[in-house]
Image (tube, grey):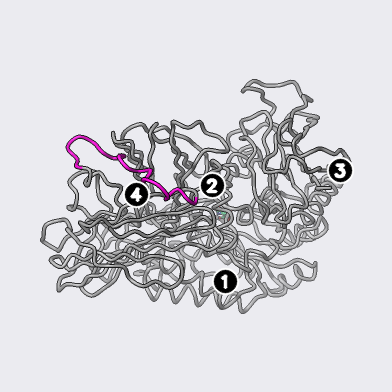
Amino acid sequence: MNRWTLRTANTSYTVEVPDHGRWAELSAWGPRGVEDGPSPLAGHGRTPFRTAADAAPAEYLPFGLRPFGGAELDVRRPGGERGSWWQFAGEQPTEGAGLRLAFLDDLLGLEAVLCYETVPDTDVIRRWVELTGVGADDLLLARLDSAAVNIPVPGGARLTYLVGQWVQEFQLKHIQVERGTFAIGSTQGVSGHEYAPWIAAQDAAQPAGPATPTWGISLAWSGSWHIDASVDSGRLLRLRAGREPHEGEVLLPAGGTLITPQLLLAFSAEGLGGLARVWHTHERLESGPRGRRPRPVLYNSWEATGFAVEQDGQLELARTAAAIGAELFVVDDGWFANRPDDTSGLGDWEPDRDAFPDGFGAFIGRIRDLGLDFGLWVEPEAVSPGSRLLADHPDWIYRVEGRPATLIRNQLLLNLGRDDVRKHVLTWLDKLLHDYPISYLKWDMNRPPTERGRPVSPLPRPADLDAAHVANYHHILAALRTGHPHVMIEGCAGGGGRADAAAIAATDVVWPSDNTGPQDRLTIQHGFLHAHSPHVMSSWVTDSAGFFDTRPRSPRFRFVTAMAGVLGIGADIRAWTVEQRAEAARWITWYKKWRATIHHGAVHLLGAPSDDTCGVQYSAPDGSHEIVLAWNSGLLNGLPQLPGRPDRLRLHGLEPAARYQDEATGSTYSGAHLLHAGLPCAWRTDFDADAVVLRRC
Ligand code: DGJ
């Protein structure tokens, strides 16, 4: 028996390869020390007809090796039988903290290396698999997951996941699976609006709360994917995740190596809130020095002007934005020629001369003269039917020869996986950033791939178009960041359609949703913050009522909501009254003072937007203060309340003996009071909101 223990800041993950050498299995995963004793997984997974060995919590299984329970890898030779019966071939050296376990199938000609890496100062472990064709034949892979993880669930599994649709992304949902399989995924070539590639799991025998052991996974993949969560009668939860071989099978050429996307694993002994903090810490570390740059308060003109972008209107917005304290002005869709609406213009990317008669450079200069940085919207993967680009390169889009190409939002999609398309896109973006003083780029994508053919040049079969597209999307982002390190990049896909861990790592902020209605947004942000850090969560104050809960909300409510992440303004501020602008200026000043804590403090999610009162607490890294953003739903136990009902919000993570002073009111509280009695919220109206600073005294 070989045994290894990976250690993160607070957790251990112990893997063994039994003497039979057919697979690696998980011995323990949880708080440090959990590996010291008999395996917590022992006996789990045992069902009638399964031997103890066959029930073992395997780390990664090829189809064939074990009769029941599914497999993470489905491999065959063209024309051959499915399956692999590999054997452990030893541990391979690693760079840094990690583990590489090699398995070899001589007959098939396949080497699979299970790779593990701990991320220093976090409780995150990365797992992936490297598959190499070591025989004479090509291999075909119908399933190539990144990893499987096993969790003992004596009471069945309580799963938490993020579900949605356009304008309703990141809805936090729970489901209890006592037996059977729960599956989520995307076949849209992007991580998608419908589900985030993220899931959290708890043993349903333990009540959900701030001390419930919680395991989570997040797939770093910006294309099609799946996560399956299966609970068997042996009370073992097996989470399996990977990219979806959208074209049926993926080719692994003889001598070639295929690396799966990384699956990020996290554990917290502090419930879903603790798990969220693990993910936040990881995202902050991953974004490195770029993540520590203060996120500018931006103004984006999309909701104010739509496609009707022209110099005078934009400058008027910019003057007002500068006056209320915005730091960056972003012109969204509609700045380029032939774009009166969404039927044309994409692909050619020339500034619209009619809209900017003095020249685009002169326009940007005037924005910058107002003291604002300048940002621009692009949709590099998209092309309109009448564009010059498509006329010149009809073979650059996804289309099946001889078949109609589907239009979504009146546009087609470039096959970004092609080398020539990647070069073209990178060249024009690079030139755009050289030609103009742009410090912010919003990269949008408003349609998924449909017919995934490749006209004119026949497709090598089986193609791996999804992977090629994703790889080049990331390649271009990386090249832009290297070539233009000062430019911040916002990831967007018709709202939150591509906000997975890999896309977030490759950008600076993401746009979680096109729904900017305050109450709807609060719910979206509540889900988002369970998986992602506030410093990547772009949010605007707009005039929008929202799509679902359209009851009026005050500017105060809207500002407190948008300040929970990276604050932006998207309203038609030209129409705002003097009082409204003055109020906006006050909030923006407040936010600038405290944004470092909001972006980098430890987050405590206090209740949910459906509660009477909910909040988000941000604890300053040095412990000197707490920021509490709080909202009142106007409901108590789901019933409408009379306005003006006071409430309390219990805070988390404070020292009971410490004292805290409310900066605005001067009231002081002990930590014990705030933890157990709660922070008083004197709601003046329905749907009130507050931003409180508590200084430790
Ligand atoms: C979808 C984005 O999510 C919006 O913010 C906006 O940029 C539009 N596209 C523009 O077409």
- Which residue bears the numbered disc 1? 350
The secondary structure type at the circle numbered 2 is helix
* Label number found at residue 664: 3
Q: The disc labelled 3 sits on which kind of residue? A: Ala
Q: Secondary structure at mark 4?
A: strand
* Rendering coords of residue 305 (x, y %): 67, 53
Q: Which residues are magenta?
A: 32-51
Residue at the spot of label 4 = 240
Badge 3 crowding class, 10 Å Cα cut-off, few under 14, some 14 to 19, many 20 or more, is few
Q: Depth check: give the residue in front, 29 or 584.
A: 29
Please tell me whether mark 3 sits on a helix, a strand or a loop: loop
Q: Relative to 581, does residue 175 appear above or below in the rendering?
A: above
Q: Locate residue 574, reporting x and y percent.
A: 78, 51
Amino acid carrying mark 4 in the image: Arg
- For the point 62% across and 78% down, which residue is it? 435
Q: CA distance from mark 2 to mark 4?
A: 19 Å
Disc 2 and disc 1: Cα gap in Å?
45 Å
- Comparing 400 with 237, the one in front is 237
Q: Position of residue 480 (x, y in %)?
A: 54, 73
Which comes before the other along the chain, label 4 or label 1? 4
Q: Is residue 527 above or below residue 610?
A: below
Asked whether residue 179 is drawn in magenta, I would say no
Distance CA(mark 3)–CA(mark 1): 50 Å
**Residue beneath the point at 51% across and 69% down:** 477
Which residue does the numbered mark 2 point to in the structure image? 275
